[in-house]
Image (spheres, rainbow, N blue to C red):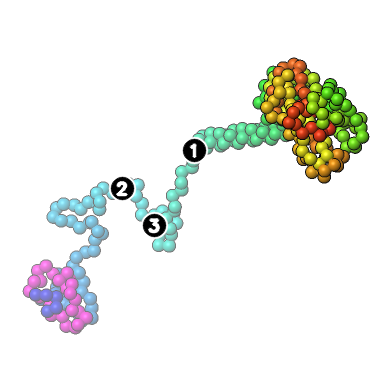
Amino acid sequence: MTAGNNGADTPENDDPFAHLYRSEGGEGGSGTSSVGAARQPGVPRTSYNQVRTVGQRQYGNQQAQPPYGRQNAHYAAPETLPGGGAGGTRPVPQAPEPRKGRNGLLIGAVAVVAVVCIGIGAAMLTNSDSSKNDAGANPGPTAADSVQPSDQPASKPPAAKLPKDDAGTLRLDGGATTAKDIPGARTASGSYVTNLNNQGASATWTLDVDAAGKYKLWVGYGVPGKDANLTLNVNGQALSRPINLKNFAGAPEGAWDKGWTKSWSYIQLNKGTNTIKLSCENGNQCEVNLDQVWLAQP
């Protein structure tokens, strides 16, 4: 038998939970409660069960225990707390205060580090300013000074000056002589050696050098617009090739004053005194005037 056919007189009294309100002995559907009162239309049924707090129902002789075991002695209902109740709020638990001892040590350590950093910065600034002042007053050694050994000279000694002479100071033989008729000679007096256009005529230069070796012999000369050459003899030995005295100035033929120029030849000299002879020999073209002779490094 269901709750729908329990003899309800109105639809609103057709309660699906009617079995909760019937007497345990009313299985026969008498429609009366445990106290024998008849139901009235429109009046809700009264349950024979008493409303109990959750967990307080007894089963047999066993006494119900509080929910979730023994009740916490420290627990208190929210309404019992100050400001509690329907409209109150529970107080927010406060965070524990930090330990003053550790915070004091931490603050002290940070302060010490800050003081040390400030001191180092001040020292660096002071040293930088001092270095700038010192550099301006007395500049230190340069990179070149620092790498150069102190036992070596700062620069190489100047090379020994090689000899240079006017041709008029040479020893002249075979009819060679000096003259000043043709302008343009590069000597201080304007003189030069002439009359070399005779076989056997020569000019000999005696000179000293500090070291044996190869040198350049430079000869200053003038030609009348055409090429010339002379035999070159060094320390008594004639070279196989004559010294070339071409018309490098490009002077027209016969223009002695426009034919001044210079030429050179390699020679090997000994340490000390040497002799160099320029002579007109068989096969030479000797129409030339000489104004200067000098040595140079090869």
| Left or right of residue 261: residue 25 | left
Q: Dot 2 corresponds to which residue?
A: 72
Q: Is residue 214 above or below residue 2?
A: above
Between discs 1 and 3, the one toward the N terminus: 3
Question: Which segment did they paint magenta?
Answer: 6-29
Q: In the rendered structure, find residue 243 and report the number of the disc placed on it.
A: none
The secondary structure type at the circle numbered 1 is loop
Numbered-mark total: 3
Q: Nearer the viewer, residue 58 or 205?
A: 205
Residue at 21%, 64% (x, y): give it.
50
Quadrant of residue 49 within the rendered picture: bottom left
Task: Tell me if label 2 and label 3 are in contact, CB under 8 Å.
Answer: no
Q: Dot 1 corresponds to which residue?
A: 99
Between discs 1 and 2, the one toward the N terminus: 2
Label 1 vs label 2: CA separation? 31 Å
The secondary structure type at the circle numbered 3 is helix
Amino acid under disc 1: Arg
Residue 93 position, x and y percent, is 44, 49
Is 73 contained in the magenta span?
no
Q: Nearer the viewer, residue 33 or 295?
A: 295
Between discs 2 and 3, the one toward the N terminus: 2
Q: Nearer the viewer, residue 34 or 111?
A: 111
Residue at 18%, 79% (x, y): give it.
14
Amino acid under disc 2: Asn
| Left or right of residue 181: residue 205 | left
Q: Is residue 30 above or below residue 128?
A: below
Residue 264 position, x and y percent, is 74, 32
Look at the image and tell me in which quarter the N terminus lies.
bottom left
Label 1 vs label 3: CA separation? 34 Å
